[in-house]
Image (spheres, rainbow, N blue to C red):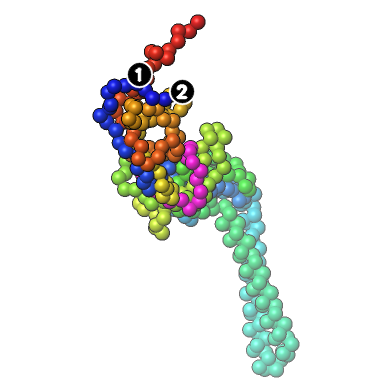
Amino acid sequence: MVIADDEMPAGSVVVVRTTVTPTQSGYGAIRPVADVALTAQETGRITDFSILPGQLIKKDTVIGHLTGTTIEARRAEYRARLQQATAAETHAEQLLTIDRRTLSDQISTRQQLIGAEQALKRAQGERRVAQARLNELIRKTVVRSPIDGTVTTVEHVDGSLVRPGTVIARLAPIQNLHLTARFFDSPITPGMRGVFLPLGSHTPIAVRVTQVLPIDPRDGSRPALLRPIAATAPSDWVMGVAGRVELSRPPQSRMLVPTRALILDQGQWWVLLQTARGPQRQAVTIGHSQGDDTAVLSGLKAGDRVIVEQVYRLFHRDFAQRYQQPD
């Protein structure tokens, strides 16, 4: 359709085909893929426990103990067994020493010496087993951080009664942090590269998509996990840091027009072509915007001249002629 207009607009551009690198934007935050649960390994009460959410804890830091009558009874039992095993080992060593001396005096036989050596080995083995059982019980009653991490939640307090498997707290690992970002338009694929722009920082971080998660039915977004491309994570790669993500797509041949040349009317995008007969409407299909320009996927060809000034006024110039009073 040609719009009757005696005045040709002064502002227009010639459409040219160019190679562009489309980008896809999303927003995300750095967080661990999953928290680490700190669980009790024995039945008892938590003591000396005072960690708080947000607290940074180093690996193997003692953050509490488990006590109680059952634990103390087992500890006493294992210590008694260790004392008995140690005494038996000492006795076996003494007998072996005696047999070695009497063998040289031809009082004991070689068979007696072999029997004494075997008895010592059995006693040593029983002592090691008793020591290992006591050490394992002590290890289970000392609550340590299994990782370098930040406390995210505290499930119990000092004095709480817990059982094996009870979650005492949850930690977010400092290492192996991922950027979890959400995208709403084109599909995301593993291996895509781009940059992460943390809020308040002017230093972009080069990132790569490592995993694409299922679409979130709540908002239709597609979450993705990203990691820094550099072997060593930068100083800004800290849990909780949020910002914008811009992913680069493969270069594509596209026709770009100034975004201000586009007209949206009843759900359809249009441009006005400058022709010898005057401004002419042309329906177009658009793609991503890049800076002040927008890619046109169909509806235009190289060499077309597109009007960029007063486009809405020209587009609706004959509105009064086409308007019909409702019944």
Q: Give the percent coordinates (x, y) of residue 195.
A: 38, 48
Residue 154 visible in image? no
Instruction: Tell me the SS state at disc 2.
Output: loop
Instruction: Tell me the SS state at disc 1.
Output: loop
Residue at 67% x, 90% y: name it.
102
Tell me the magenta residue range.
183-199
Q: Give the percent coordinates (x, y) of residue 62.
A: 48, 52
In the rendered image, the residue lying farthest to the top is: 327
For residue 189, above or below residue 4: below
In the rendered image, the residue lying farthest to the front is: 276
Residue at 61% x, 64% y: name it.
132
Q: Which residue is mark 2?
A: 266
**In which quadrant will I find the N terminus?**
top left
For residue 253, above or below residue 124: above
Residue at 48% x, 38% y: name it.
185
Q: Looking at the picture, which amino acid does disc 1 mark?
A: Arg
Residue at 70% x, 94% y: name it.
106
Which numbered disc flags the more N-terminal residue, 1 or 2? 2
Q: Nearer the viewer, residue 139 or 264?
A: 264
Q: Give the percent coordinates (x, y) of residue 119.
A: 70, 77
Q: Nearer the viewer, residue 117 or 274?
A: 274
Q: Which residue is mark 1?
A: 317
Q: Is residue 159 left or right of residue 92?
A: left
Q: Residues within 10 Å of mark 2 (few under 14, many from 20)?
A: few
Residue 104 visible in image? yes
Check if residue 326 falls in the magenta segment.
Answer: no
